[in-house]
Image (cartoon, coloured by chain):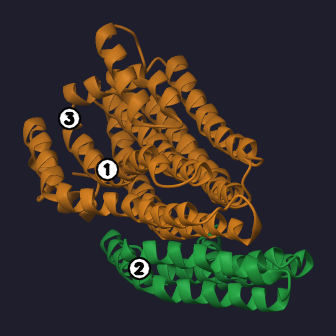
Chain colours: A orange, B green
């Protein structure tokens, strides 16, 4: 194999994916998920339980004392700070995990794309291979820049704003938080739209796909990947076509490795998002409205993180597969 | 339940006594009210203790750091003390002093909650472009 298999992927799969068939690869992925599911679930549930415990404490205090006036108003403020402090370290750790996954994915796809571009050149389409390689690198680089310069700072700003909003109360900063979230969605969405347009213009995403499969994929992606789910689901036709190309080409190793790299951070971040949503749904029972809103908004921060990872994964997957389809003729 | 009943009865009897002596000796009535309040709180300490232990166990099980829980407890203590003191002053007709206690208590509670603010800032400081 002309590209290196990252050790993270080999660890997750419990072996080298180089000699796996598609079924063996899927089986290894399922085994990898099953063997880690307990730990991932526990790790994902803990932050939600923690913020709920902080909210419960504040709820008890609010029930015991009237916080509508006087000095007791400081309790929801301290509660908001406690909730963000409890969830913040986890969010930072996941941000680092996401960054690390994107870096590994980027390195892997660079090696893979270079070798596939060389294969495409050998098969008689050097111009097409070079063009696709250049475009893939361009979009990947642009996405990395957008994430590092726009999305990640915006994520921190979003957490700061929702914290301030919960501390001050009144929802006066809710619109600003919504604007920040929309900005991240728009930035990622525009880039993905440009990438999808590139695929359409270059003929990579040709028709002939099953409409039902596309509809199902759109629903799944849109629901599973928050914030930018709509954008990703719009690109699902490309994904389906690309995945078929992989299955019909010699790209099984690349696909399995890609999945092994992407699945763990997706599970970690996605499950935290879901558990925080659950905590937000339960929290009105134990604390006042603004702390509930804070927990709900915190889940939005994890959603933004998930969207960033989803966008990176989509561009890497489609770039890789478009090269594979070219090299496979 | 016993404690709550005793506190309620003590409070009602004390209020009656305070009202009886208030006209002739307002200062004495105020001191009496404060003393009864202190007695009730001391008796209620027996209730707070298991509740605090339960919250502590819950926080430990949930992974909430002792620093965060401890800070929340300190904020609650400071705010409660200031609240009770300021309301007592208002009952005695000293609204100005009550407001001052509110202000000072609020400031003290904010200072006590600084470790939480510091933890949030340390997260936000993590935003450092690579």
Provide the secondary structure element on which disc 2 rests.
helix
Tell whether label 3 touches label 2 (CB within 8 Å): no
Residue A5 makes an appearance in the image: no
Q: Residue at x 20, y 44 (%)?
A: A253
Q: Camera-side residue: B59 or A42?
A: B59
Q: CA distance from mark 1 to mark 2?
A: 43 Å
Where residue A19 appears, x then y in whole percent? 9, 48
Question: Are marks 2 and 3 in one subunit?
Answer: no
Residue A10, quarter of picture: bottom left
Left or right of A319 in this view: A3: left
Chain where mark 2 sits: B
- Tell me the tag on residue A250: 3
> Foreground mark, 3 or 1?
1
Residue drawn at (9%, 43%), measured in percent from left and top? Answer: A27
Q: Residues within 10 Å of mark 2 (few under 14, many from 20)?
A: some
Number of other residues with Cα within 10 Å of mark 1, as a class: few under 14, some 14 to 19, many 20 or more: some
Label 3 or label 1, whichever comes before in sequence order:
3
Q: Residue at x 63, y 48 (%)?
A: A146
Any mark on residue A267, and which? 1
Real-space Cα separation, disc 2 to disc 3, in angstroms:
70 Å
Q: Which label lies toward us, 2 or 3?
A: 2
Residue at x 52%, y 53% (from the top left corner): A295
Evaluate whether residue A48 shows in this view: yes
Dividing the picture into quarters, in which one does residue B119 lie? bottom right
Q: Residues within 10 Å of mark 3 (few under 14, many from 20)?
A: some
Residue B64 position by quadrant: bottom left
Asked if residue A144 is positioned above or below residue B57 in the image, the reply reads above
Name the spot of residue A294 as percent of width and height, x first.
Answer: 58, 53
Q: How far is disc 3 from disc 1 in space, using C-alphas? A: 27 Å
Residue at mark 2: B47
Tag 3 subunit: A
**Residue A61 got which mark?**
none
């Amino acid at each position: 194999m002309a590209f290196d298999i990252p050790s993270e992927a080999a660890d997750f799969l419990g072996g080298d994916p180089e000699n796996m068939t598609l079924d063996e690869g899927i089986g290894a992925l399922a085994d990898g998920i099953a063997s880690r599911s307990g730990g991932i679930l526990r790790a994902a549930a803990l932050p939600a339980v923690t913020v709920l415990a902080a909210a419960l404490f504040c709820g008890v205090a609010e029930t015991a004392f009237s916080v509508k006036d006087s000095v007791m108003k400081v309790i929801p403020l301290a509660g908001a700070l406690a909730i963000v402090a409890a969830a913040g370290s986890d969010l930072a750790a996941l941000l680092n995990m996401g960054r690390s996954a994107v870096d590994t994915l980027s390195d892997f796809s660079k090696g893979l794309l270079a070798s596939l571009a060389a294969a495409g050149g050998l098969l008689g389409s050097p111009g097409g291979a070079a063009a696709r390689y250049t475009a893939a690198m361009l979009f990947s680089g642009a996405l990395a820049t957008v994430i590092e310069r726009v999305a990640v700072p915006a994520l921190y700003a979003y957490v700061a704003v929702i914290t301030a909003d919960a501390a001050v109360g009144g929802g006066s900063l809710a619109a600003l938080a919504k604007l920040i979230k929309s900005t991240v969605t728009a930035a990622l969405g525009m880039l993905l739209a440009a990438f999808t347009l590139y695929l359409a213009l270059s003929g990579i995403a040709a028709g002939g796909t099953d409409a039902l499969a596309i509809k199902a994929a759109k629903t799944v992606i849109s629901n599973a990947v928050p914030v930018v789910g709509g954008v990703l689901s719009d690109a699902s036709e490309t994904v389906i076509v690309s995945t078929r190309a992989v299955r019909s080409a010699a790209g099984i190793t690349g696909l399995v490795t890609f999945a092994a790299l992407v699945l763990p951070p997706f599970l970690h971040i996605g499950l935290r998002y879901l558990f925080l949503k659950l905590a937000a749904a339960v929290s009105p029972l134990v604390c006042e409205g603004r702390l509930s809103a804070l927990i709900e908004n915190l889940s939005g921060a994890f959603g933004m993180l998930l969207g960033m990872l989803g966008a990176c994964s989509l561009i890497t997957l489609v770039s890789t597969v478009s090269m594979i389809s070219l090299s496979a003729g | 339940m016993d404690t709550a009943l005793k506190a309620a009865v003590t409070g009602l009897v004390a209020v009656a006594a305070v009202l009886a002596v208030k006209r002739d000796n307002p200062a004495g009535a105020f001191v009496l009210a404060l003393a009864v309040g202190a007695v009730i709180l001391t008796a209620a300490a027996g209730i707070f203790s298991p509740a605090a232990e339960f919250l502590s166990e819950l926080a430990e099980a949930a992974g909430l750091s002792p620093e965060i829980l401890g800070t929340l407890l300190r904020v609650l203590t400071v705010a409660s003390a200031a609240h009770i003191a300021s309301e007592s002053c208002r009952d005695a007709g000293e609204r100005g002093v009550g407001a001052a206690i509110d202000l000072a208590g609020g400031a003290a509670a904010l200072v006590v909650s600084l470790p939480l603010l510091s933890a949030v800032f340390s997260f936000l400081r993590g935003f450092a472009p690579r």
